[in-house]
Image: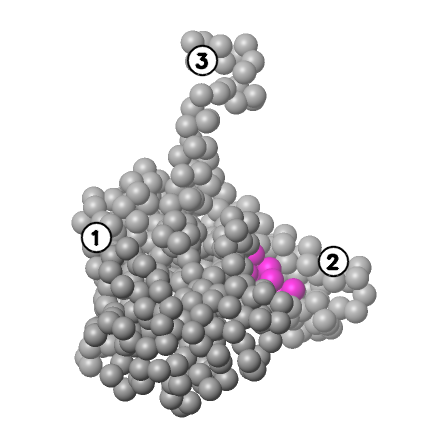
Amino acid sequence: MLLERSHVALGDQLTGLLFLQWDANVPNSIDVQPKLVVKVGCRQSIKTSKWSLMLVVVEGKENVLRSSTERSSPTPSIVAARFIRVSGHEPSQHPSAHPVHRQLSSLEKSQIASLSDNRVASKDIQSLVQQRGSLATRKDIYNRVADIRRDACKGQSPIHALADQLEKEGFWSRIQFAPDGRVTAVLFAHPDSLAYLRAYPELLLLDCTYKTNKHGMPLLDMIGVDATQRSFCVAFAFLSGEAEEDYAWALEQLRSLYEQCGITPPSVILTDRCLAAMNAASNLFPSAAILLCLWHANKAVLARCQPKFPEAEEWKEFNEFWHSIIGSPTEDEYAKRLVEFQQRYTPEHLDEVGYINATWLNPFKEKLVRAWVDQSSHFGNTATSRVEGIHALLKSYLRRSTLDLFEAWKAIRLAVLNQLSELQARQASQQTRTPLELSGALYGAVRG
């Protein structure tokens, strides 16, 4: 058996130590077998026929060395070989060419584990450890991070590791299985998020994001809004698809969460124009007002209708008509503005008028137009753009779309923890200062 040892390059000569365990097949003399392969502290194996060797025997615990060309001890345990290059490759130009010089210390391994758990990229980890004198390459860091991830699973599959960790950390979670035992959906909520939900249950925003895991499963984000108009994550669900049954399963589990935790159901649910999500929300939260995202509606009208108006002024007028209809404060005003709109753009833009009526106003005016929307306590939230912000936040932690569900959950968990920390700090700060608009003498009696 050969044990690798470091070496030193000196000019044209290469010197160093090899530790070799005696083998009965190795001859006693210096004339070793030409076919014996010796590892010389590098990735290349070189036959001993290319080297001039001087063998010495290491005896006893005091490691006394003495020259010998023959075995002077019946059972020596280790032989050290000093070698001088006769032929072969040139000396390495840098110590990092040899794995022995790139080995990570226990402290470096601990630091890499901490950095990896906090979603620091491998290239950034490499920069940090190299600043401390390490010769580890990017590949060494990648390999160490991969080892850390395997160790985190404790020999289990990623989905089993996820289920165990959700239970261990107190997450409220549910997992859906197919008849053949495959996992088809996972829903989870952080326990601290549930505390926020108890305080601010009125609003629920729903939207899916994509490219978060290697299985291609859409991630449904369920978002709430607190008293300072800041978003907080309620729960997340990895789904098999975006059919109505997928949303129905996720929202059924969410309703169960509300019931088990004694949380008041939402009074307003806001989503984009996803009929599957709207139908599932209506069935599972019948008392909630289901509103459509105004931002998505405006974006769709822009994409569909603007190309039909080559002149900027014409498009501006058409767009203002659309916004005036959506912003109608009463039902009578809505009817009046709709008639004016149709008279103005019929028949020249019959297709555009038909699109707005058929796609948005006729089926969804109660979910879009201010006259109906303002009958619900939405607190100014008529768009899911804040959910897009949550999507961006999650992607900044996920970094890539090839993670398994366990690794994706760990990234989401870290994002949620940091978000909750910021929310708590913001609320604590607001409790210690008086808003400028309330600092006048008029509110002196209230302030005390």
Pick the front one: 373 or 176: 176
Q: Earlier in the sequence, mark 3 or mark 2?
A: 2
Measure the C-alpha gap from mark 3 to mark 2.
48 Å
- Judge from the rendering whether residue 124 lies leftward or rightward of residue 148; answer left or right: right
The percent coordinates of residue 306 (x first, y second) are 70, 67
Residue 96 visible to an observer of this rendering: no
Chief secondary structure of the magenta portion: helix
- Residue at image coords 27%, 86%: 25
Q: Residues within 10 Å of mark 3 (few under 14, many from 20)?
A: few
Q: Secondary structure at mark 2?
A: helix
Q: CA distance from mark 3 to mark 1?
A: 45 Å
Give the image's coloring scheme: one colour
Number of the label disc, if any, that sits on residue 168: 1
Q: Which quadrant, please, contains the C terminus?
A: top left
Identify the residue at image location x=58%, y=71%.
Answer: 13
* Residue 134 sits above or below residue 81 on the image: above
Residue 107: x, y in percent? 38, 49
Q: Quadrant of residue 356?
A: bottom right
Instruction: Classify 55 as above or below 137.
Output: below
Whether residue 165 is visible here, answered yes or no, is: yes
Amino acid type, residue under disc 3 in the picture: Arg
| Tag nearer the camera, 3 or 2 | 3
Between residues 424 and 396, which one lies in front from this camera angle?
396
Q: Is residue 74 left or right of residue 326?
A: left
* Of marks 2 and 1, the one in the foreground: 1
Q: Point out the stretch of residues depicted in magenta.
A: 293-302
Q: Amino acid at mark 1?
A: Lys
Q: Earlier in the sequence, mark 3 or mark 1?
A: 1
* Badge 3 vs badge 2, beta-carbon distance below 8 Å: no
Look at mark 2 in the image and give the residue it sits on: 317
Q: Position of residue 195 (x, y in %)?
A: 29, 40
Q: Residue at x 65, y 75 (%)?
A: 351
